[in-house]
Image: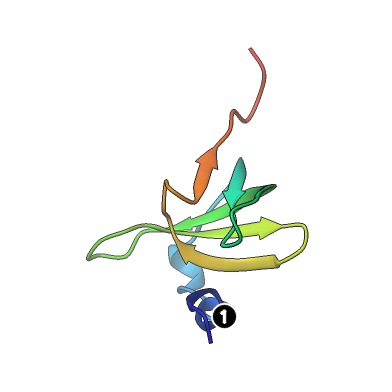
């Protein structure tokens, strides 16, 4: 079982979630890129922030934020 599968059912406490709408490009394990969005953030007391990522093929899941895998895109034009 891969790391992403381990996180599929995990969720942080609802009261600690900060909801957002952040478009992203997701660098998949197979080397391809896909459009998606982060729709929530959670910051644990001891380290790396986690985000709830929604992608077209894989659905929605929580993962530690990794700038190597998630490219934040502008949310609105100027």
Which residue in the rendered view is the most extreme toward the front?
31
Which residue in the rendered view is the most extreme toward the left?
46
Which quarter of the image is occupied by the C terminus? top right
Specify whether residue 2 is in view: yes
- Residue drawn at (48%, 77%), measured in percent from left and top? 3
Q: In this image, 49 relative to 34: left or right? A: left
Name the quadrant containing residue 59.
bottom right
Specify whether residue 22 is in view: no
Which residue in the rendered view is the most extreme toward the right?
56
Q: How is the image coloured?
A: rainbow
Image spot of residue 12 (x, y percent): 46, 73
- Residue drawn at (51%, 76%), measured in percent from left and top? 11
Image spot of residue 33 (x, y percent): 64, 47
Q: In this image, 61 relative to 16: left or right? A: right
Image spot of residue 42 (x, y percent): 43, 60
Q: Circle 1 — which element?
A: helix
- Residue drawn at (52%, 40%), measured in percent from left and top? 71
Q: In this image, 45 relative to 18: left or right? A: left
Of residue 26 and residue 23, the one placed in the foreground of this image is 26
- Residue drawn at (60%, 68%), measured in percent from left and top? 61
Q: In this image, 14 relative to 46: left or right? A: right
Bin the neighbour count of mark 1 within 10 Å (Cα to Cα): few under 14, some 14-19, many 20 and up.
few
Image spot of residue 70 (x, y percent): 51, 48
Of residue 75 and residue 3, the one placed in the foreground of this image is 3
Of residue 27 and residue 56, the one placed in the foreground of this image is 27
Look at the picture and state if 20 lies above or below 41.
above
Which residue in the rendered view is the most extreme toward the top?
78
Please give the count of numbered marks on the rendered protein.
1
Residue denoted by label 1:
5
């Amino acid at each position: 079982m891969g790391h992403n599968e381990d996180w599929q059912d995990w969720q942080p406490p609802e009261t600690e979630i900060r909801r957002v709408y952040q478009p992203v490009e997701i660098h998949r394990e197979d080397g391809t890129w896909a459009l998606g969005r982060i729709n929530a953030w959670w910051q644990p007391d001891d380290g790396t922030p986690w985000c709830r990522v929604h992608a077209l093929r894989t659905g929605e899941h929580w993962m530690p934020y990794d700038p190597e895998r998630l490219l934040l895109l502008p949310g609105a034009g100027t």
